[in-house]
Amino acid sequence: MNTHVKTELAPIPFIDVAAQRARLGTRIDDAVTRVLNHCRFVNGPEVAELESRLAAFAGARHAIACSSGTDALAMILMAWGVKPGDAVFCPSFTFCATAEVVPWVGATPVFVDVLADTFNMDPASLEAAIEVAKRKGLTPKVVIPVDLFGQPADLDAIEAIAKANGLKVLCDTAQGFGATWNGKRTGSFGDATATSFFPAKPLGCFGDGGAVFTDDDDLVPVLKSVREHGQGVDKYQNVRIGMTGRLDTIQAAILLEKLAIFEDEVAARQKVAERYNAALADVCIVPAVDPRATSVWAQYTIRVPQGGRDALGPALQKEGVPTAVYYRLPMHMQPAYEQYPSAGNGLPVCEKLAGEVISLPMHAYLDEATQDRVIAAVRRALGG
Ligand SMILES: *Cc1c(COP(=O)(O)O)cnc(C)c1O
């Protein structure tokens, strides 16, 4: 038994939704009450207002609110008419939803390796995956770069490869909304972008929600039709196969209040990351941000090589410091996905990272005393 464990300290929350609600005072309650009073629970005025604010924030011509990040990804593939025989390139080191939507439209996910320093799609592996897809008789159609843990993927390299190979670029910024690449926010890159407002994401609502961003004027009516059961001139004419993809008005009202403080929250997360980086760089591999990027730190993920990772979580848990492992098993090794092709014979970087990564508590309301508790516990556990 470790005698210097201060068992009287309350466990630290991994994310803290309550602290944000306290800061917003009655603004969320008032916003919800306004919706309860006007009763337009579906397609209410807050939805259109949120869409225009999100588009302005991201620097995109259009934002289309929807029911989740997963549905945002699916709506884009459906609107583009991606179909059986098409190859869609996904990083293997991601949340499952990135690849899950591909078989929904009958297409084939092809898994791509990532870069060890940024955790994001490796452009050289993407090129190898395109060749694999062609050899298998698939038609390369779409690449889905993921902004993992809050940092944009290498959009310069990926957009260039996409252009050379006639691929559409669907950016998955479920974890990276609010981050920048070359000074521009995510949502303004590629042919379309999907994001998520799941409560644990950097900008979360109080349930499920998401959005699509695009500059393509012609895609907007198609996305809106897909969102409403493939409706045509009205909801009783169906011109394509669609879904129930709308964002609830209550969630839009909540997001409007949260978007107003989001920039400030991103800045607070950046400060936490900088303090962690400075205090932990000598005991583990701290996350690297590309000089062209900023991160919104959806996760603060360190690497503990040489088998130390598995002992770290339980050691920190004893001190009331929660951790999480994103992701323990890459997609190409998951039972539901191992049948699909990948760029190489195994994806060595994904497989190595899966054994080394662990994420520490990260949110905008993590005060310095709590950060110091996390830092001290990690240093103790890693012998620093
Ligand atoms: C969370 C997440 C999604 C899915 O978002 P939901 O709103 O939970 O459906 C998709 N891609 C990535 C990378 C995610 O982290």
Image: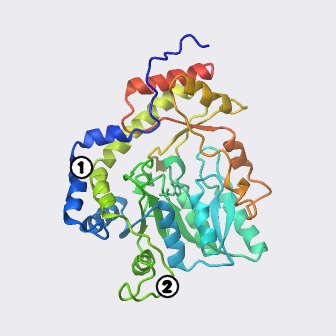
Identify the residue at the far top of this view: 3
| Front-most of residues 67 and 172 | 67
Describe the element under mark 2 as helix, strand or loop.
loop
| Front-most of residues 152 and 176 | 176
- Which tag, 1 or 2, sits closer to the chain's start? 1
Q: Quadrant of residue 154?
A: bottom right
Residue 107 visible from this viewpoint = yes
Q: Is residue 189 left or right of residue 260?
A: right
Q: Quadrant of residue 223?
A: bottom left
Question: Relative to 40, does residue 146 appear above or below in the rendering?
Answer: above
Alpha carbons under labels 1 and 2: distance apart? 38 Å
Question: Relative to 352, does residue 130 appear above or below in the rendering?
Answer: below
Q: Quadrant of residue 378?
A: top right
Q: Residue at x 47, y 69 (%)?
A: 192
Q: Is residue 171 left or right of residue 48?
A: right
Disc 2 crowd rating (10 Å Cα; few below 14, some 14-19, many 20+) is some
The residue that disc 1 covers is 29
Q: Amino acid at mark 1?
A: Asp
Describe the element under mark 1 as helix, strand or loop.
helix
Q: How many marks?
A: 2
Which colour style is shown? rainbow
Q: Residue at x 49, y 15 (%)?
A: 6
| Front-most of residues 223 and 317 | 317
Question: Relative to 53, does residue 28 appear above or below in the rendering?
Answer: above
At which x and y percent is residue 270?
41, 39
At which x and y percent is residue 170?
53, 67
Q: Point out which mark residue 240 bears.
A: 2
